[in-house]
Image (cartoon, helix red, strand yellow):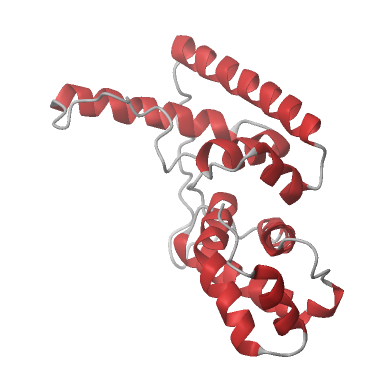
Amino acid sequence: MIPLENERDTIISWKRGNKKAYEDLVRHYRSEAYLAAYGFVGNAEDARDLSQDAFIKAYIARERFDADRPFYPWLYRILKNHCLNFLKRGFRNTGSLYYEDSPDRERFASPSPTPLEKLERGERQQMVRYAIEQLSDDHREIIMLKNFRGLAYKEIADVLEIPIGTVMSRLYYARNALREIIERLEVEGLPEPSPMVPGPAAGEVV
């Protein structure tokens, strides 16, 4: 992740009440914030609203922010808590950014895959999607930050406020857990979706 040029000066100006300085921060980090929110809630409209809310919360809390620290890790923690509270209220709309970048994409894939290749690729992506959803929250989050957002170990450590050694060990166990789930799914297949139980017809007494 590339920090904003002269970020510290921009932050100091923002903390002194310069709204234009904060607009520069928002403009620089809004795509990253949106993608992070999408990773938590899996819905484009909700992700847009939640990321905007996080920027507002950060603006209100500017006096508590240390200008000597990078801005995005602090914003990420605000955004994460906001998204988790949103999910706790039961508004989750399934979908995910965790796998939007197609982690199983073949590096040297043909530019014009055959219909069979498209089908197999789609099935593989569906399997990876399901597997990632089965991970613990910590494991899913660190897979997202490293493999899908492409953050360096130091950046992940700053975002999560944990030592680099913990980042490395957590990522190691997360990848192992993901591999084991995928290997099991390759043998057993994906579970069948639960059938929808129809509700009572209009006016029906139950």
Q: Does 151 sit left or right of 126 as displayed?
A: right
Q: Is residue 117 above or below residue 4?
A: above
Q: Choose between 135 and 31: the one closer to the eye.
A: 31
Residue 101 visible (yes or no)? yes
Q: Choose between 191 and 138: the one closer to the eye.
A: 138
Q: Does 188 sit left or right of 19 as displayed?
A: left
Q: Residue furthest top?
A: 187
Which x, y percent locates residue 154?
70, 41
Q: Residue furthest right?
A: 64
Q: Residue at x 59, y 43 (%)?
A: 151
Q: Residue at x 80, y 31 (%)?
A: 166
Which x, y percent locates residue 61?
80, 77
**Quadrant including the C terminus:** bottom right
Q: Is residue 112 above or below residue 68?
A: above
Residue 206 visible (yes or no)? no
Q: Residue at x 21, y 23 (%)?
A: 117
